[in-house]
C-alpha cells in the first residue's frame, strides 16, 4: 500500500462530487515517512522518481554536530530527543526530524538535515552543558 499524491479530491463549486477521470499514475505515488528514532544504525535505500536513490534513516544513535563559534564538526552520540516541534506525537515518541532538538554528549543541538530524505543526521550546537 502506498501514499497517493494526486489532487482529484476536491468537490464542485455546487458541492457535488467530482468523478475520477483517470486511474492513479505511478508518478503520483508517495511513500510513508521514515520516522527516524533513536537506536542502532538502520537505513533503507528507496528508488525515487527518475531513478534517484534516496537513503532514509530509520534509526541512528550518532549525529554530526557543528559548533557555530569554532566551525568544527564532530560525530557525537545522541543521548535523547528533547523536543520536536513538527508534531506533538513525534515529540511524545521521540522521533527525529528536521528542527528537532536533541541532547548529545557535546550539548544541546538542533537537527538541520532531513534524516528521512538525506540519510544522515546533521545538527548545530545551540547550547553547551555546564560541567561542574
Image: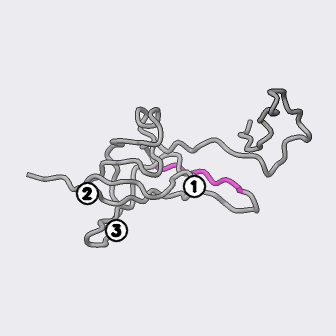
Q: Which residues are magenta?
A: 41-48
For the point 50% across and 45% down, which residue is it?
A: 36
* CA separation in Å, label 2 and label 1: 25 Å
Secondary element type, mark 2: loop
Which tag is nearer the camera, tag 2 or tag 1?
1
Residue 50, percent from left and from top: 76, 62
Whichever of labels 1 and 3 marks the residue nearer the N terminus, that label is 3
Residue 81, percent from left and from top: 36, 43
* CA separation in Å, label 3 and label 2: 11 Å
Q: Nearer the viewer, residue 24 or 58?
A: 24
User: Where 76 sits versus 22, above or below?
Assistant: below
Residue that badge 3 annotates: 73
Q: What is the image's colouring?
A: one colour
For the point 12% across and 53% down, which residue is it?
A: 131
Majority SS type along the magenta span? strand
Whichever of labels 3 and 2 marks the residue nearer the N terminus, that label is 3
Residue 3, percent from left and from top: 71, 40
Specify whether 114 is left or right of 23: left
Among all residues in the image, which is located at the extreme top? Answer: 16
Magenta-colored stretch includes residue 42: yes
Specify whether 19 is left or right of 95: right
Q: Quadrant of the N terminus?
A: top right
Q: Nearer the viewer, residue 114 or 64?
A: 114
Residue 100, percent from left and from top: 40, 47
Secondary element type, mark 1: helix
For the point 53% across and 42% down, which residue is it?
A: 35
* CA separation in Å, label 1 and label 3: 21 Å
Quarter where residue 70 is shown: bottom left
Whichever of labels 2 and 1 marks the residue nearer the N terminus, that label is 2
Residue that badge 1 annotates: 117
Specify whether 47 is left or right of 38: right
Give residue 106's mark: 2
Amino acid at each position: 500500500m502506498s501514499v497517493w499524491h494526486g489532487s482529484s479530491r476536491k468537490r464542485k463549486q455546487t458541492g457535488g462530487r467530482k468523478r475520477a477521470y483517470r486511474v492513479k499514475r505511478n508518478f503520483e505515488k508517495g511513500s510513508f515517512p521514515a520516522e527516524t528514532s533513536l537506536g542502532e544504525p538502520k537505513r533503507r535505500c528507496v528508488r525515487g522518481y527518475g531513478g534517484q536513490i534516496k537513503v532514509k534513516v530509520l534509526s541512528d544513535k550518532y549525529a554530526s554536530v557543528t559548533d557555530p563559534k569554532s566551525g568544527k564538526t564532530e560525530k557525537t552520540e545522541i543521548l535523547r530527543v528533547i523536543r520536536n516541534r513538527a508534531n506533538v506525537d513525534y515529540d511524545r515518541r521521540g522521533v527525529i526530524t528536521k528542527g528537532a532538538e536533541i541532547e548529545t554528549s557535546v550539548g544541546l543541538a538542533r537537527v538541520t538535515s532531513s534524516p528521512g530524505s538525506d540519510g544522515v543526521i546533521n545538527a548545530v550546537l545551540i547550547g553547551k552543558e555546564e560541567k561542574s
